[in-house]
Image: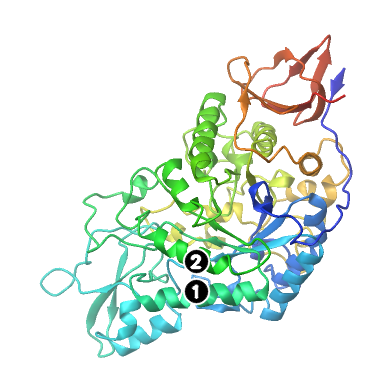
Amino acid sequence: MSQQHSAAPARHFATVSVADRRDWWRDAVIYQVYPRSFADSNSDGMGDLEGVRSRLPYLRDLGVDAVWLSPFYASPQADAGYDVADYRAVDPMFGSLLDADALIRDAHGHGLRVIVDLVPNHSSDRHEWFKRALAEGPGSPLRDRYHFRPGKGKNGELPPNDWESIFGGPAWTRVTEPDGTPGEWYLHLFAPEQPDFNWDHPAVGDEFRSILRFWLDMGVDGFRIDVAHGLVKAEGLPDLGTHDQVKLLGNDVMPFFDQDGVHAIYRQWRRILDEYSGDRIFVAEAWTPTVERTANYVRPDELHQAFNFQYLGTAWDAKELRTVIDRTLDAMRPVGAPATWVLSNHDVTRHATRFANPPGLGTQIRTAGDRELGLRRARAATLLMLALPGSAYLYQGEELGLPDVVDLPDEVRQDPAYFRGAGQDGFRDGCRVPIPWTRTGSSYGFGDGGSWLPQPPVWAELSVEAQTGVPGSTLELYRSALRVRRERPDLGAGESVEWLRAPEGVLAFRRGDFVCVANTTGESVTIPSHGRVLLASGEVTEADGETKVPADTTVWWTAER
């Protein structure tokens, strides 16, 4: 008998108070919304908060627990909102504070929690502090809130140290002083429009504790901390002594990343969060050399979760996946924190495209690869991820099986790294193309005024409209998987898996009466059946107590009949 995954039509989950379930974050499925690319309510080609609000029923019916919103603060948009000019204001392109309030309230009404981005490593160069620091000149107290330094060389013409920007080029920019002369340099680990705060200055800490309270009072359920590993720099800002520094990221502790001093900041923040009711959380974007160092961020008195970038960067290979799963669970267990699992986000090539290409190309890939293969593996990888203990993060559009758009014309690109040499590849625009809702329209239902990045024609048949209720569609696979996960709370719970014997290239583990098998090979395998099939990412065949699992397919079983 052949069996495809169940493809139940969309269903409405009962809405519950967001305060009903304690420790909800330990096994939550959290959906990342990139506001400028989710839904456009005013037909200007740019997504906005009212657009997100209008689509909350879709997210409720998809079956996620919370929504994480990428930055919507007032910003010149030099880096898509990660250059914040005012942390207590909404950029007009996204709406207003009233729109943010309505979105939070409506989300809670649908039983969804809201997590917002916080960007504490750097501000915009249009931030009032930085503008005053420039205008007041050398000696201004405002300059102490950033990293201003005199240059090296006879006339200060060389940067203060050899640090390089993640986006390419020096991590320092020289300013022109108010009298018109070349002056001091300021540090920016990212774009020049993003000067780094000096977290040794008490005013910086005071300001961000105030910002936390502002949004907590608005009702948000938590914060995703951008560049959580970057706030503290090594004393004296020492030279690194090497070039191509971006290639070292994630392999070594750098003088500007993952310094131990960051943990005192987060212990202060945790005390603030614990004053508020409703089980609110912090999530760290912390690029560290090892999962063991990532675990330092989620000790009991610090943050609640940290993104598992080691897992995101793992190839579709059973041996490599088992290694990173074991290391992750082993690292989180001593600190009592849940593991997190993620396959895509706004900074990396979508996993449907990464898995369509040969391994070893990194997380920003310029080629489409074998799209059929990539989608098959992506579906299988999602079921594997959702079967692991801990919390899972989904990126908007992955439930539609969207690939990266790898052929965007140069003239439409907006990733600042694209315009600077020797930094990140600069191809993040490909995963940020607005998602499709309908088969037709100027932007496939994104809005009535086109879209800020061009969408390919294939978007029509990948749209929500085209996939809803269609057996075998990727959207219905996600809906079914999230329904099963919600109906079986043991799926995300716990801190370990029981590995089962399996053929080479196949992962198999048990969790209570649940079994997950992932075939990462390019050939079908026949294995003993483990009970009743709950769900499969592809078509499986059962006969005489055995199950034929196709290439690049994951299957969920239950011992229950």
- The image quadrant where one finds the C terminus is top right
Quadrant in which residue 409 is drawn: bottom right
Left or right: residue 561 versus residue 505 is right
Q: What x and y, as percent, mark residue 258? A: 38, 53
Element class at badge 1: helix
At 31% from the left and 89% from the top, the residue drawn is 136
Q: Amino acid under label 1? A: Arg
Point 76% across, 46% down: residue: 462
Q: Are marks 1 and 2 in contact (CB under 8 Å)?
A: yes
Asked if residue 81 can be seen in this view, the reply is no
Along the viewing direction, whichever of 444 and 141 lies nearer the viewer: 141
Report which quarter residue 530 is drawn in: top right
Which residue in the protein does label 1 denote?
A: 209
Q: Which residue is mark 2?
A: 269
Residue 165 shows in this picture: yes
Task: Compute the Cα span from label 1 to label 2.
Answer: 7 Å
Q: Residues within 10 Å of mark 2 (few under 14, many from 20)?
A: many
Report the side of 232 relative to 5 (left or right).
left
Residue type, label 2 = Trp
Q: Say if 178 sits above or below 488 in the image.
A: below
